[in-house]
Image (cartoon, rainbow, N blue to C red):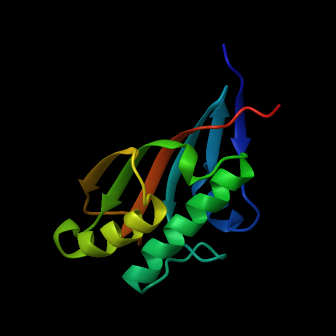
Amino acid sequence: MSQRTAIFPAGRQALYEINRYSAAIRSGDLLFVSGQVGSREDGSPEPDFEKQVQLAFANLSEVLKSAGATVDDIVDVTTFHTDPETQFGVVLSAKDKAFPEKPYPNWTAVGVNWLAGFDFEIKVIARVPQTQ
């Protein structure tokens, strides 16, 4: 059985402590990143939706970096949206910046009615590069 290792980036600890979860769990060369939201250092939501999405992607990048990975190592993406019809253009723009070239990771978008005060969340699975 593979050992699970919790991964935490510097900062944003308030959100992890408030909700009692790990930013990511590494098992072997797989990294399972918890849903990342556009939270500030104190765990509060960024009120501007576009900035919230950008911050969620930035927070995701920090978690990946803490595990020795980048967005290029992502193989699976799931996003959650409180109002997909009106928000999807902003999300697609952020997605295109994060994943500008083929092959794109697979992607599942889910409309939800609650994200603990947030309007967007992104969770991923990545394969962590092996260090020599």
Count of numbered circles in the view: 0
| Position in image of residue 40 (x %, y %) | 60, 77
Residue at image position (41%, 70%) is 94
Residue placed furthest toward the right: 132
| Position in image of residue 62 (x %, y %) | 66, 61
Seen in the image, is 31 located left or right of residue 48? right
Residue at image position (32%, 63%) is 114
When the figure is inspected, residue 50 is found, relative to residue 3, above or below; the finding is: below
Residue placed furthest toward the front: 101
When the figure is inspected, residue 26 is found, relative to residue 96, above or below; the finding is: above
| Position in image of residue 82 (x %, y %) | 27, 67
Residue placed furthest toward the bottom: 48
Quadrant assignment for the N terminus: top right
Q: Is residue 116 visible?
A: no
**Nearer the observer, 22 or 107:** 107
| Position in image of residue 70 (x %, y %) | 62, 52
**Nearer the observer, 61 or 47:** 61
Residue at image position (68%, 19%) is 2
Residue 11 placement: quadrant: bottom right
Residue placed furthest toward the left: 85
Q: Is residue 105 visible?
A: yes
Quadrant assignment for the C terminus: top right
**Nearer the observer, 79 or 21:** 79
When the figure is inspected, residue 81 is found, relative to residue 3, above or below; the finding is: below
Seen in the image, is 125 located left or right of residue 9? left
